[in-house]
Image (spheres, rainbow, N blue to C red):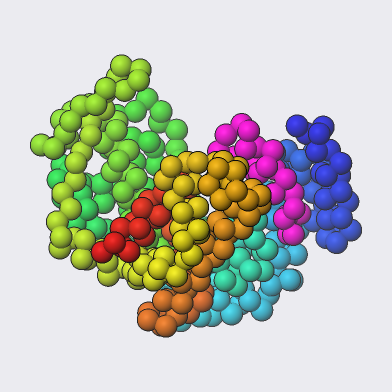
Amino acid sequence: MRSEYGAHFERIHREGGENLPAVAIPLDALADTCLRLAARRAKSVSDFGRQLKELLRGRDLYLAVGLHLRLEAAVAAGRRQWDESLRRVWNASAEIYPNQGFQPEEFERAVLFSAAENCLRRDLPLSETIRKRMCFPDFYLSAAALSRDPRVAARAAEAFTKKYFPLAQSYVEKKWSTVPQGEDRIGALFFCALYEHTISEKTGNPSKDDSKRPPLLAEYHGQGPLAAWLTLTLGNMIRDSLRTSKHLVSIDEEREAQKDGSSFPKVELAEPESQREEMDKCRCVKILRSGLRTSWKHLKPRERLTLVLQTLMEVPPSVIARRVFHVHEGTITKYTTNALRKIRDGIEKFALSEERMTRDEIAGCLEFMREAFSETETLAGGIVSAASAMEEN
């Protein structure tokens, strides 16, 4: 694969060296890093080539790779290029969390490193990532909690715990009320979020692997609200602990046989109407639900049918074109693209007019939804199914 894309790596290396000569990434390091990043993004072996091509088209790829490799020259180049934006978000964040002692230089490094990770994952320009795709001051607090200065880290950890521990308690009480020791996972989450930890400390179950993992907050790159990231991480931790548990976990437990003959505990969680109403108050969920309800009604019949056939029934576009509409396959792609654009526009319109959200807040919500629901094919079918049901009601 490296030999197949060798010319592309050489072009990026040459152009990057001309534009940013001080960064000076070795060609081998550039190529190896791109291959690893594409492998991390690929969902399957067959998807690897597509992901690599998209990655190599990135506008800020050379500098982003330099930041990914933690090169000081890349940090210096980033500061020169976005000094004004970085200082502006530091000032605004420091007003929200005063007296933390978090120095601008360390904050700027953290922003650049995380912006590069977001850029490499989403193929976004670094400038757009810093200005529009990172949630401040949430990222400021998380980065301060991981500061190399122990005094700064201690103050930020205290502020982080004070603000988000009650939120985690409320989340467990509503979402995981039937799970034994759910409250214990909250303490484990905050320990693992702020400090090095082992797998057993994360799941609460014995493990032979006692190697240390970085704090979980190192995985938060400002991609959406910190509260949303925190509850998602806590839910995943609870699920991990249930999967690895060898004991009876709740009165709702069922044993389901797997393909390999093993079994694992399945927990059916109670979800009363009061909880559903509480969930509806989340602004991100509300704009998705209400915007979807409105936009689905404005789709043309052929656009609705195309989405239903593709997502719910998994009919290939070529078959839809040939046997349903008797058109070229490209026309079906147009139907799908137009329908998805109308749905997104409907969500944004509702958020702007009804919720009075800014475009940056909307982008943050959509970004979090993509992170929270990575199983896109299943999610797409669920969206179409939900929209269809809304129309009937």
Location of residue 266 in the rendering, given as x and y in whole percent from the top left corner = 23, 34
Location of residue 180 in the rendering, given as x and y in whole percent from the top left corner = 15, 42
Is residue 18 visible to us here?
yes
Q: Name the foreground residue: 249 vs 84.
A: 249
Dividing the picture into quarters, in which one does residue 164 lie?
Answer: bottom left
Q: Which quarter of the image is occupied by the N terminus? A: top right
Q: Name the foreground residue: 265 vs 210.
A: 265
Is residue 93 visible to us here?
no
Look at 63% across and 55% down and name the residue there: 331
Dividing the picture into quarters, in which one does residue 390 lie?
Answer: bottom left
Q: Is residue 246 left or right of residue 28?
A: left
Vertical order, 347 against 389 (above or below)? below
Location of residue 355 in the rendering, given as x and y in whole percent from the top left corner = 37, 79
Q: Is residue 2 left or right of residue 271?
A: right
Q: Is residue 44 magenta?
A: yes
Look at 65% across and 37% down and name the residue there: 48
Q: Name the foreground residue: 45 vs 209.
A: 45
Q: Is residue 205 left or right of residue 56?
A: left
Location of residue 175 in the rendering, given as x and y in whole percent from the top left corner = 22, 53
Look at 46% across and 47% down and name the residue there: 309
Q: Is residue 188 magenta?
A: no
Q: Name the foreground residue: 191 vs 205.
A: 205
Vertical order, 45 against 168 (above or below)? above
Look at 60% across and 48% down and name the residue there: 326
Looking at the image, the residue that sits furthest to the left is: 251
Q: Which quarter of the image is occupied by the C terminus? A: bottom left
Q: Start and end of the magenta stretch? A: 36-62
What type of secondary structure mainly makes up the magenta span? helix
